[in-house]
Amino acid sequence: MKIALLHYSAPPIIGGVESVLAQHARLMASAGHEVRVIAGRGGVFDRRIQFVSVPLLDSRHSTILDCKTQLDKGLIPQSFSLLTEEIAARLKPALTGVDLLIAHNVCSLHKNLPLTAALERIRHQPDSPKLVLWHHDLAWTSARYRGELHAGHPWDMLRRPWPGTTLVTISAFRRQELAQLLDIPADQIRVIPNGLDAARFLKLAAKTTELAGKLDLWNAAPLLLLPVRITKRKNLELALNAMAALLARLPEARLVITGPAGAHNPANQQYFADLKSLQSGLGLENSVAFLADLQPEGLPDEVVADLYRISDAVLLPSWEEGFGIPLIEAGFSGIPAFCSDIPSLRELGGSGVSYFPPGSAPQQVAALIADTLEGNPQYRQRSRMRRDYRWETIYARHLVPLLEEAQ
């Protein structure tokens, strides 16, 4: 599909709507759509996405600002009709071949009313693309704009329905506002929330992003990290059995074991094979990931650090430790730790760690983890945001159905 996204400005101009528009454009391009961005200011921000400059779309264009100064006083300048015609004439070639036009905020704010009027004119033409009006902000419901809005045309374009268009808001609250403003049922308005590029925000290495996608770590709830080499003294069979018990209560739980088999004891390879058999016997193939299967030589330090950033807790069930560096790493990462109650870990962890005897029943360890995390509002918020508000999730859940209906 050929899709155009329209706004006053676009990246590299910095702004909330500009950021959302860019994410939408990138995701659509990645899905194979032909995407162009039409704006008054901005430039090429992704080589796959065409940028079309129409300067009069810019809300800060001097001519548009002069017009707005009069409009804010309730006066319609003589230039309004001419500007509307000129913008429509310049938009027309920019929309050639476009199947779907997504207009961000230009039909809900009064920052460039000649543009709004031009868009209304274009949409009535027989060869115009299907139109999605994406409302981030609403001028008519905002107290700060009240003195700049007046009865009649062109201000009423922002508070009456546009038949034949698809309406989108970014929250249920905004949908209710828009439904009341337009006097239409709320179920005629889609809610598509904004999101976050998690990999960019967390500055994850490319390898970390690859692993998180391949192992579906973003949807884990909780995501537990066991950052050790595979050796007998790490008591990894307790971790696997505890995971089997935990899944009965938290079916989306995942455990990542980062290290390869210990390098200094040939018996460690047999121990790894035994753990893999236990994993299979417990049905944990999709819930426990041995990264040694994917990276036998071990992970770079920066990827291990990344895994702390996306995990919810550290699990350390060792029989024996001389120190316990993962407890320090968990502390620096701001995530809880569950570990064996052995002298070295008790000395290091103090009262800031949740302990269990290394010979505990798996159900006891599972209950400790579940009770602690379910009672932690930071964990609940973290896992919900990770699951629901990554851009990839929002695209799959919301944008794909929108685009399919437009075809």
Image (spheres, grey):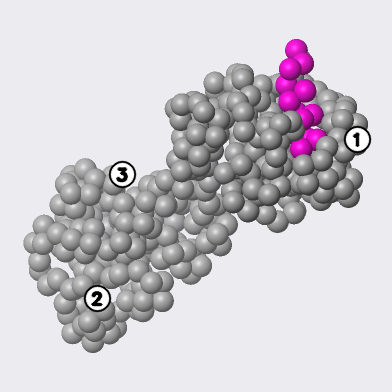
Q: Which residue: 22% across, 49% down?
A: 250
Among numbered discs 2 and 3, the one appearing first in the sequence: 3
> Quick one: label 2, few (<14), some, or many (20+) residues within 10 Å?
many
Contact flag, marks 3 and 1 (Cβ < 8 Å): no
Residue in the foreground of this view, choosing between 296 and 28: 28
Q: Residue at x 35, y 69 (%)?
A: 335
- The answer to whether 400 is drawn above or below residue 237 in the figure is above
Q: In front: 369, or 146?
A: 146
Q: Which mark is residue 78?
A: 1
Q: Earlier in the sequence, mark 3 or mark 1?
A: 1
Report the amino acid beneath label 1. Answer: Gln
Find disc 2 in the rendering and name its residue.
353
Does residue 292 appear anywhere in the picture?
Answer: no
On the image, the x and y values in percent for residue 73 come to: 78, 46
Amino acid type shown at disc 2:
Val
Q: Is residue 34 magenta?
A: no
Taking depth in this image into account, of 220 and 121 the one nearest to the observer is 121
Percent coordinates x, y for residue 249 in the rendering: 18, 49
Q: Residue at x 26, y 79 (%)?
A: 352
* Secondary structure, magenta segment, majority class: helix
Is 283 drawn above or below residue 314 in the view shown? above
**Where does label 3 land, which residue?**
286
Query: Mark 2 touching mark 3, by CB under 8 A?
Result: no
Q: Earlier in the sequence, mark 1 or mark 2?
A: 1
The region drawn magenta spans 113-126
Q: Quadrant of residue 87?
A: top right
- Residue 120 on the magenta span: yes
